Image: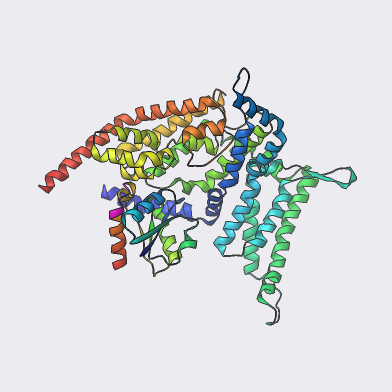
Amino acid sequence: MIQVVLVCNGGMSTSILASKINEEGKGDYSVSAYGEQEYGEHLAGADVVLLGPQIRYLIDDVKKVVGDSVPVASIDPRTYGTMNAVKVMAQIQQLLKK
Amino acid sequence: MDKFTAWIEKWIMPFAKKLAGQRHLKAIRDTFMTFLPPIFFGGIIAVINAAPAVEGTTNGFMLAWANFATSNATILGWLNTVTLGFLSFYVCIGITYYLCKNYKIEPFLPIIISVAGYCMLAIDPQKLEYGNVLGQLTYFDGKGILVAIFVAIMTVELYHTLFDHKVGYIKMPDSVPPALMVSFGSLVPCLIVLFIDSIIFVLCHNLAGTCFAKVVIDFLSPAMQATDNLGFAILVAFLLNFGWFFGIHDTVWSGFLSPIEYGTLSLNATAAAAGAALPQVFTVSFWCYFGIIGGLGNCLSLGLLCLMSKNKEIKTIGKLGIVPAFFGISEPITFGLPIMLNPVLLIPSVLTSIVNVTISYLLMSANIIGRTYAMLSYNMPSIFGAYFSTGDFKAVLLIAVLIGLDMLIYLPFFKANEHIQELEDAETEAAKQ
C-alpha cells in the first residue's frame, strides 16, 4: 500500500481529496491530510508528499523537511479543484517511478 | 496565459514564500492557527452569556436562558475571561513555543521565562493592606498583544543568541551528566532575560505608575485606532482576495493580520463579558463570517451560480464545491472553476468582499447590526457564525442579503466566464475531430 501525505494550509480541503483517493484507490493508497504546521510529525513511512496548490510556494521548505528519499510535488490547481482522484493517483505513480 | 503564469511563479511566489517563511511571522501564524479551541470555548460561553432580550416574550426556553445567564453572570464572565480574555497571555506562550521549535530549542524553559516576563510587563501590582497584592488582568486580553509578541520574540531571540555564544557557560568535567550541562548553560541566559524584563517593569512601575502594556497602548493607540476603520477593512478585503486570485492562501498575511483581528475580538469579548458597549467593529469573526461568505472569493454565492449553470462541467464544480463552501472552504471552486488566475473572475471575487465589508462595517458602526464578540471556528457557516458571533438575529438577515448581492455582482462575470469556457470546449472538440 502506498502511503501518501497531503499537505495544505489547515488540512481541511486536502482531507476531501484524501478521502476521495482512499475511496477510489480501492485499498492501494493510504492518504492522510495534514496542515502545514503539523505534517512534519507524520512523515514516518510516507512514500510521497503532495502539496495543495494554495501552499505551493512552500515546496522548497517542505522538500528540506522531508529529505531527498521521498518525492515532493504540488498538485495541479485544476486537478485539485475538481478533486480529481484519478489524476492525482496518476501523478503519484509517476513520482514513484522516478 | 502560460507566460502570465510563469511571471506569477517568478515574481509573486518568492514574495509569498518570504512572507510565509519569515520565522517570527510563522511563529505568530502557527500560534493563531492552533489555539482556536480555547477561543471557541470562550465564544460558546459568550453566546450563553448574551441571552437575547426577553421583554415581552413568553417563550419558556428564552426566559430560562435569560434567567440562567443573569444568575450565573460572574461564573460565565470568568470562564470567558480566562479563555478568550487571556488571549495575549496564550499568544505569548504560543509564539515562544513555535519560535523555539523553529530554532530547535527545548521550549519548556523559554516558555516559563516568557510567562514570567509577560506577567511583569502586563500586570502592575498594587499593594493592599494585610500584605495582599492585587493586580489587574485587563492587559491579558487583546490590549496586551503587542507586549505578548515583544516578550516572546525577545525571550527566544536573546536566549537563543546567548546560549549559542555560550554566555555564562560553565565548563564542567565530562563526568557531569549532559542534562545538567544544559541547565547550567541556560542559567545565565535566563537570568539576563528576566533581568531585562525586570528593568522594564521597574521603570514603568516607578516612573509611569502603571504596567508596560498600558504605556505601549497609550503610545500606540492612534496607530491601533487606524486598524479599526472602514479603509483598513477594505484594504484587507482587497489584499487577501487579490492574493487568493494568485492561489496564495490568506495565511501568508496572518502573521500581521491575526494579532490585529484577534486583538480587537478579545477587546469586544472583554467588553461583552462586562456588559459594556463593544468598542471594535473589525474583528476576526467580522472578517470570516461577513467579509468572506463561503471562504475567500465569496464562494458560496459563486457556488450557487455554478449549481444553476446549464454548462455540465460548471454544474459539476458547483455540486462538488457548494458543501465545502458552505463551511467556508473555497478551494474546490477557486481551483476548479477556476477563480485562480482567471482574469474574468478577478474583479467580482475582490469586489464582493469589498461590498460585504463596507455594508457590514457601516451597519455595525451605526449599531444597526450587533458587533462581533465571539469567534467559533473558521468552518462555522457564515449564516450561523453571524448569529453566534453577534447574538443578533438581524446579522443572519444581513448574511442572506449579502449572499444575494454577491450573486448579482458575480452574475455578469460568471456568464462571461461560462461563455468563454463553452467557446474553449467547442475549440477542443473541433481540434479532436
Q: Can residue B353 be seen in this view?
A: yes
Instruction: Please tell me which residue lies in front, B38 or B263.
Output: B38
Q: What stretch is highlighted in magenta?
A: A82-86
Q: Residue furthest top?
A: B56
Dominant SS in magenta:
loop
Q: Where is residue B112 in the image (x, y as percent from the top left)?
A: 69, 58
Give the residue drawn at x 37%, y 36%. Answer: B349
Q: Where is residue B263 in the image (x, y as percent from the top left)?
A: 60, 41
Quarter occupied by residue B245: top left
In the displayed structure, does residue B83 sit left or right of residue A21? right
Give the residue drawn at x 69%, y 58%. Answer: B113
Quarter occupied by residue B42: top right
Q: Where is residue B238 in the image (x, y as percent from the top left)?
A: 43, 37
> Is residue B396 positioned above or below B378 on the image?
above
Whether B278 is among the magenta residues is no
Label count reads: 0
Q: Which residue lies furthest to the front in this view?
A: B60
In the displayed structure, does residue B45 sit left or right of residue B119? left
